[in-house]
């Protein structure tokens, strides 16, 4: 490892050592009480969330937010959980389908993307470890959402926060549960879940989940099949320690992915102040129901992962958790890159109209391997005769990520080569005008011709071949102190990370880089075509906050935090690039590595949390402000050597988001639960680069300004309806910008003036309100500890037409489900 990293790591090791000595000194003077002789001490791990923490669909505790079990009401920022019972009640078996129930969270994707508080992220957490999506609903026990930069306790994180998928946990009770689901769109699911002890002493216990899920969508050919297998085994030792091993297999086979509704333009005459000859007027929503890719297209993803965790409570003061994770992810796709393109209406009304699908299909492979090690040391102790309670947490994290992604282009395959040539009917689709969903649309006037065969590998070459590795080593020290008999909780911490990028094997020539990596002579600028790209950076990010109990039931909270974020596949052209430096004095003109910077953010959280009626009603009303810097944007630079103006990508963008959030979890009676979550997000660009002068102040693409949901569940516990559950949920998402803030603008690179604009940036995905209902009945008769439940769920009960909300142009404006009926049967033995 290079010396710069070694020096940083030595500094970090010294800091860890000092912190550990501080913790030891604190513990030595800790005011702890020893149990009386003969008393049995029951030790509960501080790294576990309670087995049954929820009222309704939200959990009342979180481990993701601080890496230690903490009540949500005591945190200095906003976090929310959603349990798997919600998905079971409403028949949701694929989590990336319209996941908009949590305020501020939209566009959750199986590929790892999501938007939270208006900021995009390309990775998630799985049980606290980084993961690029690839999860199945059947083995997720709950979803924990950490809002804001406070999520930096795990290292790199988007400014909006992080999503942590918590796996189902082993249980000692012997149960066998079989769930069978059938419904509209050929939805089918068979899930077998088994838990129990492997020995008579109940020291070793497990959970096993086997799941097969399949479904189709509106349109032709599109089909998803999920294979989700999961096993976890835990052993409790007699010394208050435990070890847990987990293995997971996930495979999603997706044929003919859905295509987004294309933009519609109308022709216009150029004017002196606007040279554009087209103007954006809307979306062709009807065309989204026609598959653009055909039966020989695919987009498949897979994951195999392993986790081993050791958790030990030494005494009333010291606890430790150490875990290791390894994952192997794959994606392979073919012909999912030829979607519908923009439609320009003819000058003559009723004239011929043709939509030309994307260029030439390719086949891509993405191979990703990674993993990490986490070690958490916690000291819980009291000072000043139990008047001050402390939690001192020291964490050390190592993460490694490797990606290899060859993309294959056309070779001797004649049919593939001819895809985009001339008047080829496979690429050109004649359209006709129709009225659908209350507006004028255009749909194919006849059968669509598709590519007739799968990819011919013989003789094809790679058009992209990049090997990338990101390695980080960091740690966090966090101090939580409680004063005045629990009335005031203070939080303070700092996170340090050292990160290295290593990239090589380019077969696409990035500007000034050349093939196979760095390959540039820093004096002449000549491309040599050999070498590697290495970049290093170090980040130190603080966080602090407070939570004060104004009354027994009312808490005020506030926090400030900073974070950094690096995309797992972060901008290879920027990392690999060089920057020209003009001659100055005796120093000749030369080149230096690009000024790559990770995105950074700082933000404030503040609000009020309440808990009434013996914690039966819990609510949070909060606001936030976050400033995101070093966003990659287009800029115009003048080469100091050639004096020519060029458009470059630089980390110079600035995005500011502010908004409010509300979360409610209420149990009015023992039979009725009500859950609500809503958010308002105001996401704007303060700077989008000098190359986009009019984008400043415009909304961020794919960010929903408002979204939220209200859900309720009523359980009959007596009388003739005993065993009957009634569920209802309504979800709302406001109209959402679906184009980048510079879309349609053409800029003169010399004057930096917009010479033409089509107003494409103003296009939006329409708002939607979706109602879901469910009814479940536990059959009254039982025999030999067998219990049966039948259920019916209705999705989009009022059959409203709407489009999906995605995190990029491919995932946005796909057609959502019309009204669908789902029937479930569950049989359990316990």
Image (cartoon, rainbow, N blue to C red):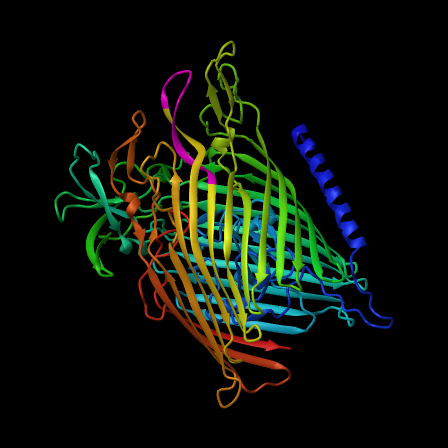
Compared to residue 801, the image places residue 19 above or below, namely above
At 39% across and 16% down in the image, what residue appears? 642
Compared to residue 522, the image places residue 801 above or below, namely below
Compared to residue 76, the image places residue 89 above or below, namely below
Residue 409 position, x and y percent, is: 43, 36
User: Which of 320 and 622 lies nearest the eye of the viewer?
Assistant: 622
User: Which of 350 and 751 lies nearest the eye of the viewer?
Assistant: 751
Name the residue at the bottom extreme. Answer: 719
Residue 487 position, x and y percent, is: 62, 63
At 38% across and 57% down in the image, what residue appears? 706
* Residue 73, quarter of picture: bottom right
Residue 99 position, x and y percent, is: 45, 59
At 61% across and 81% down in the image, what residue appears? 786
At 57% across and 27% down in the image, what residue appears? 532
Q: Quadrant of the N terminus?
A: top right
Q: Quadrant of the C terminus?
A: bottom right
* Residue range highlighted in magenta: 629-645
Residue 631 in magenta? Answer: yes
Name the residue at the top extreme. Answer: 586
Residue 544 position, x and y percent, is: 59, 50
In-image side of 180 versus 26 (left or right): left
Q: Is residue 54 visible to us here? A: yes
In-image side of 355 versus 681 (left or right): left
Count numbered badges in the picture. 0
Residue 427 in magenta? Answer: no
User: Which of 72 and 485 lies nearest the eye of the viewer?
Assistant: 485
């Amino acid at each position: 490892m290079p010396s710069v990293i070694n020096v940083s790591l030595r500094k970090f090791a010294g800091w860890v050592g000092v912190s550990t000595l501080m913790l030891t000194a604190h513990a030595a003077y800790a005011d702890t009480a020893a149990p009386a002789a003969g008393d049995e001490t029951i030790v509960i791990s501080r790294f576990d969330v309670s087995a049954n923490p929820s009222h309704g669909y939200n959990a009342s505790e979180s481990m993701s937010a601080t890496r230690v079990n903490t009540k949500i009401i005591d945190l200095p920022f906003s976090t929310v959980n959603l349990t798997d019972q919600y998905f079971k009640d409403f028949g949701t078996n694929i989590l990336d389908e319209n996941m908009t129930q949590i305020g501020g969270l939209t566009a959750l994707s199986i590929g790892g993307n999501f938007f939270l508080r208006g900021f995009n992220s390309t990775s998630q957490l799985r049980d606290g470890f980084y993961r690029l999506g690839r999860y199945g609903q059947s083995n997720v026990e709950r979803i924990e959402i950490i809002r804001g930069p406070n999520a930096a306790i795990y290292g790199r994180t988007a400014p909006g926060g992080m999503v942590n998928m918590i796996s189902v946990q082993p249980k000692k009770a012997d149960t066998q549960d079989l769930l069978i689901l059938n419904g509209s769109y050929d939805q089918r699911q068979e899930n077998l879940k088994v838990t129990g002890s492997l020995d008579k002493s109940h020291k070793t216990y497990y959970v096993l989940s086997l799941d097969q899920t399949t479904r189709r969508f509106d349109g032709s050919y599109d089909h998803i099949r999920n294979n989700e297998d999961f096993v976890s085994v835990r052993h409790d030792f007699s010394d208050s320690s435990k070890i847990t091993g987990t293995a997971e297999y996930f495979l999603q086979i997706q044929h003919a992915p859905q295509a987004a509704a294309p933009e519609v333009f109308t022709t216009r005459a150029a004017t002196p102040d606007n040279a554009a000859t087209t103007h954006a007027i809307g979306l062709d929503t009807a065309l989204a129901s026609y598959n653009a890719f055909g039966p020989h297209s695919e987009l498949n993803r897979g994951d195999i992962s392993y986790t081993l965790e050791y958790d030990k409570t030494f005494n009333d003061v010291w606890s430790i958790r150490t875990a290791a994770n390894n994952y192997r992810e794959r994606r392979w796709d073919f012909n999912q890159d030829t979607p519908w393109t923009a439609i320009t209406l003819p000058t003559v009304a009723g004239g011929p109209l043709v939509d030309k699908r994307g260029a030439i299909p390719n086949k891509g492979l993405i191979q990703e391997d990674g993993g990490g090690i986490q070690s958490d040391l916690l000291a819980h102790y009291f000072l000043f005769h139990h008047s001050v309670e402390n939690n001192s947490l020291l964490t050390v994290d190592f993460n490694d990520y490797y990606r290899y992604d060859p993309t294959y282009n056309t070779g001797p395959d004649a049919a593939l080569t001819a895809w985009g040539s001339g008047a080829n009917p496979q690429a050109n689709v004649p359209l006709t005008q129709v009225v659908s969903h209350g507006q004028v649309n255009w749909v194919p006037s006849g059968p669509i011709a598709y590519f007739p065969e799968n990819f011919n590998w013989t003789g094809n070459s790679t058009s992209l071949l990049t090997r990338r590795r990101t390695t980080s080593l960091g740690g966090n020290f966090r101090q939580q102190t409680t004063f005045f008999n629990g009335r005031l909780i203070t939080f303070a911490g700092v996170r340090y990370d050292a990160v290295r990028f290593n990239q090589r094997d380019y077969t696409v020539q990035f500007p000034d880089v050349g093939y196979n990596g760095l390959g540039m002579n820093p004096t002449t600028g000549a491309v040599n075509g050999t070498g590697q790209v290495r970049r290093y950076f170090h980040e130190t990010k603080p966080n602090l906050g407070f939570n004060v109990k104004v009354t027994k039931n009312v808490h005020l909270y506030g926090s400030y935090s900073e974070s950094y974020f690096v995309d797992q596949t972060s901008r290879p052209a920027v990392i690999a690039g060089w920057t020209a430096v003009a001659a100055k004095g005796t120093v000749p003109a030369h080149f230096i590595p690009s000024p790559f910077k990770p995105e950074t953010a700082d933000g404030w959280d503040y609000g009020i949390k309440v808990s009434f009626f013996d914690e039966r009603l819990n609510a949070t009303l909060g606001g936030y402000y976050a400033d995101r810097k070093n966003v990659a944007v287009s800029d115009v630079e003048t080469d100091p050597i050639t004096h020519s103006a060029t458009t470059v990508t630089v980390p110079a963008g600035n995005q500011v988001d502010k908004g409010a959030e509300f979360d409610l979890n209420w149990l009015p009676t023992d039979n009725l639960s009500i859950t609500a979550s809503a958010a308002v997000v105001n996401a704007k660009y303060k700077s989008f680069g000098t190359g986009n002068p009019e984008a400043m102040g415009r909304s961020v693409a794919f960010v929903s300004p408002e979204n939220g949901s209200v859900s309720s569940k009523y359980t009959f516990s007596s009388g003739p309806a005993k065993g009957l559950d009634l569920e209802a949920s309504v979800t709302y998402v406001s109209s959402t910008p679906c184009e980048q803030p510079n879309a349609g603008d053409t800029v003169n690179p010399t004057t930096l003036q917009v010479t033409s604009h089509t107003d494409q940036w103003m296009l939006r995905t329409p708002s939607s309100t979706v109602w879901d209902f469910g009814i479940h009945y536990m059959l009254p008769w039982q025999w030999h500890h067998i219990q049966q439940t039948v259920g019916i769920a209705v999705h989009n009960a009022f059959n409203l037409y709407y489009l999906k909300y995605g995190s990029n142009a491919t995932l946005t404006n796909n057609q959502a489900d019309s009204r669908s009926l789902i029937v479930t049967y569950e049989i359990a033995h316990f």
